[in-house]
Image (cartoon, grey):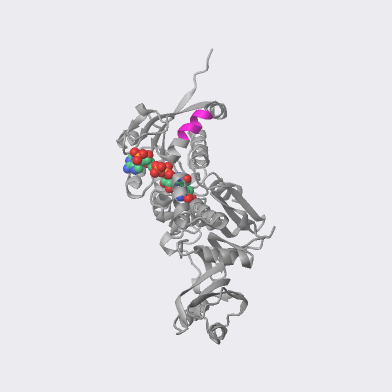
């Protein structure tokens, strides 16, 4: 005699890349999920914008609707899975879902970075769960790891390659000499890029994810707008070649480091030494390197974007919510890991006090004495040069002079570069890229 299984009903908001992965994964692993839960998970409605758009055959047409209210207001739906993206609309939708007593799973880091606290409070008030594993690191279980597995420890620093699109672009430009535009189009075709890819290439997606990780790791919420953010648009094939010659690769690094001056948070392209584990993270792979007081360094590595890795994280949240729901529980683990804020206002370290080695690219006319002028200004600001290269010779035009400095304060570097850029012998704005060197060599 067949056992009557409880059914958990899912309403999807979104029928795009990740939502399609969720539909597929729930179907492919239905038997395993049923065995794990002792209950069946069924998608009962899928909201999209355009019902007539061609879609993957796994997305049942008869479940599609263009009316999100038919997901949000249906008393038969237990969990709303938000995979539509954007901020304002979905914020209202998710508030309505939570207030209506529905659990929520989302992959939307932009939404969480902007309204995470309010959404978590609303979930707690209405005795439901809100999970978001897919919002950072795609398929890597980084949120659960920080919030649960490392709840015993004190995290001192985190360094992440947490945007798959930019990592894919930098890797392809480095390995195959492809142009930025060609690789960006490839990343979009593979479903890695955001609907608005400037969120990826200008570093904002990484900053949103860093805001989430910082809250989880340090118990301190940081506004995305307070994170100094630089994307990869200005990185040139010449930078990539110079990095290679000097023993580095260029990566977009999101970092949060607890320093005596406060939390040093930033998203920026960085030189990473070839013997550092992070330098080996290529393509759509992401990695988060945590430095914790008791357990030392831990590296989390896996696919950070794309249909199935992201769907894997979303479905794991659906299973987690379902487990709670079947036991009549909710809110066992606080949304961002802390029941009480550790600091009411975050104390961020002033960027100008942050110390690092720097790669500098100065375009200067090829004339005797010019390098001396540049070096002497750097010396005035206590910046010493570890290595210097002039690429090519052309007495009629400017040539790139690149150098690696020893450790220097960012404020001094910027002040020196303002002076260098004002010289009559330099052209273009001098570019600087930090060297990021968490001390874990292979
Ligand atoms: P897509 O653009 O592929 O899909 C978005 C879907 O949402 C589409 O089906 C669209 O409908 C639907 N939609 C958009 N607005 C509305 C609305 N107002 N009402 C109803 N439906 C709407 O996005 P992705 O699947 O790539 O991303 C979804 C979310 O997951 C985003 O928050 C993204 O940041 C996040 N994410 C994405 C990852 C990835 O690798 N792609 C990885 C991790 C997180 P229609 O199809 O009709 O246009
Ligand atoms: N656009 C994002 C990325 C998707 O490229 O990392 C995963 O969050």
Q: Which residues are magenta?
A: 22-29
Q: Position of residue 185 (x, y in %)?
A: 44, 50
Which residue lies most toward the top here? 1
Q: Is residue 57 above or below residue 216?
A: above
Q: Assign the N terminus to one quadrant of the image.
A: top right
Q: Position of residue 152 (x, y in %)?
A: 62, 52
- Please say whether residue 24 is one of the residues in the magenta stretch: yes
Secondary structure character of the magenta stretch overall: helix
Q: Is residue 353 visible?
A: no
Q: Position of residue 275 (x, y in %)?
A: 67, 60
Quadrant of the rendered image containing residue 253: bottom right
Instruction: Count the marks.
Output: 0
- Between 95 and 275, the one lying in front of the other is 275
- Please say whether residue 18 is one of the residues in the magenta stretch: no
Quadrant of the rendered image containing residue 391: bottom right
- Between 405 and 402, the one lying in front of the other is 402
Residue ID at (64%, 61%): 274
Residue ID at (58%, 54%): 288
Q: Is residue 169 visible?
A: yes
- Between 228 and 337, the one lying in front of the other is 228
Q: Quarter of the picture for ligand 1? A: top left
Q: Assign the C terminus to one quadrant of the image.
A: bottom right
Q: Position of residue 197 (x, y in %)?
A: 41, 53
């Amino acid at each position: 005699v067949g056992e009557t299984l409880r059914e958990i009903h899912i309403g999807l908001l979104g029928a795009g890349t990740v939502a399609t992965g969720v539909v597929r994964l729930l179907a492919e692993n239905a038997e395993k999920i049923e065995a794990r839960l002792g209950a069946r998970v069924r998608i009962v409605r899928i909201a999209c914008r355009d019902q007539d758009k061609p879609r993957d055959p796994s997305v049942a047409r008869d479940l599609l609707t263009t009316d999100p209210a038919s997901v949000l207001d249906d008393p038969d739906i237990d969990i709303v899975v938000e995979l539509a993206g954007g901020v304002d609309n979905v914020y209202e939708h998710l508030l309505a879902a939570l207030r209506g007593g529905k659990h929520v799973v989302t992959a939307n880091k932009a939404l969480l970075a902007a309204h995470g606290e309010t959404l978590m409070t609303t979930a707690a008030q209405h005795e439901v769960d809100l999970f978001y594993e897919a919002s950072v690191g795609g398929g890597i279980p980084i949120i659960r790891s920080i919030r649960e597995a490392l709840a015993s420890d004190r995290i001192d620093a985190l360094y992440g390659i947490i945007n798959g699109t930019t990592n894919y672009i930098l890797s392809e430009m480095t390995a195959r000499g492809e142009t930025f535009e060609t690789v960006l189009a490839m990343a979009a075709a593979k479903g890695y890029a955001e609907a608005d890819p400037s969120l990826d290439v200008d570093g904002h997606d990484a900053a949103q994810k860093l805001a989430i990780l910082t809250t989880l790791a340090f118990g301190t919420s940081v506004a995305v707008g307070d994170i100094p953010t630089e994307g990869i648009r200005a990185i040139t094939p010449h930078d990539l070649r110079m990095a290679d010659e000097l023993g580095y690769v260029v990566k977009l690094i999101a970092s949060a480091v607890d320093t005596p001056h406060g939390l040093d948070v930033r998203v920026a392209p960085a030189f990473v030494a070839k013997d550092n584990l992070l330098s080996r993270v290529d393509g759509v792979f992401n990695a988060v390197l945590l430095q914790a007081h008791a357990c030392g360094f831990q590296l989390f590595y896996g696919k950070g974007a794309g249909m199935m890795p992201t769907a894997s994280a979303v479905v794991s949240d659906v299973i987690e919510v379902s487990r709670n729901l079947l036991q009549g529980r909710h809110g066992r683990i606080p949304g961002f890991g802390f029941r009480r804020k550790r600091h009411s206002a975050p104390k961020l370290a002033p960027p100008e006090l942050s110390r690092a080695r720097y790669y500098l690219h100065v375009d200067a006319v090829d004339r005797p004495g010019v390098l001396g002028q540049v070096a002497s200004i750097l010396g005035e600001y206590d910046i010493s040069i570890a290595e210097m290269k002039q690429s090519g010779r052309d007495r009629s035009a400017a040539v790139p002079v690149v150098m690696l400095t020893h450790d220097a304060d960012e404020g001094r570097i910027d002040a020196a570069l303002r002076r260098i850029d004002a010289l009559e012998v330099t052209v273009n704005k001098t570019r600087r890229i930090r060297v990021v060197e968490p001390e874990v060599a292979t």
